[in-house]
Amino acid sequence: MQLQTVRPNIVQSIRAYRVEDLMDAAQVAGQHFLYANLAHTQTKQEVLECIAESFLFPAHFGKNFDALYDCLTDLVHKAGPQPGFVVVLEQLPDSPRFDREAREQLLDVFRDAADFWAERKVSFRCFYSFL
């Protein structure tokens, strides 16, 4: 798989892509690969904790959507030039405590991060699947 066939700043369903292929494509392109398997999460708090652990966020991560956006953008941007990102959020929960609205809010954070990086001409591709 080559990333050139995928828009550079997008949040989309993983559909026909395999996680391993996305990881390999990120490596070939020299981009960061961020992966979180959320199959064992049920709440917003658990989802954010899993993402924070998987993406190696700092210990002071606030575990809310604003803090998630800050970690995906400001903190990384301040670290210097970035080669691009391939993000996979696998098995987003579908539970009463993390419903459709919560999932859309989470994906909106990643869409906002994609826009942030697009303004800086850095690719940010996020792929997700549902449990």
Image (spheres, rainbow, N blue to C red):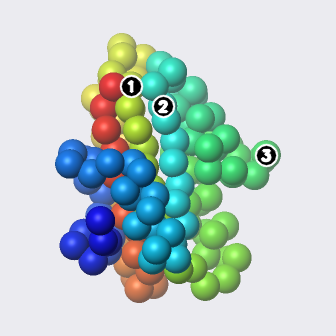
- At a point 31% along the width and 38% down the height, the residue shown is 129
- Tell me whether circle 2 and circle 3 mark residues in contact (CB < 8 Å): no
**Image quadrant of residue 3?**
bottom left
Residue matched to label 3: 59
Nearest the viewer among 106 and 130 is 130
Cα separation, mark 2 vs mark 3, equals: 19 Å
Mark 1 lies on a secondary structure that is loop
Q: Which mark is residue 38?
A: 2
Cα separation, mark 1 vs mark 2, equals: 7 Å
In this view, which residue lies farthest toward the right? 59
Up/down of 15 relative to 70, above or below: above
Mark 2 lies on a secondary structure that is loop
Nearest the viewer among 25 and 14 is 25
**Image quadrant of residue 25?**
bottom left
Left or right: 78 in relation to 105: right
Residue 64 seen in the current view: no
The disc, 1 or 2, on the residue closer to the chain's N-terminal end is: 2
Q: Which mark is residue 93?
A: 1
Q: Residues within 10 Å of mark 1 (few under 14, many from 20)?
A: many
Q: Tell me residue 56's x, y (percent).
A: 69, 50
- Tell me whether circle 1 and circle 2 mark residues in contact (CB < 8 Å): yes
- At a point 51% along the width and 21% down the height, the residue shown is 40
Up/down of 51 relative to 108, above or below: above
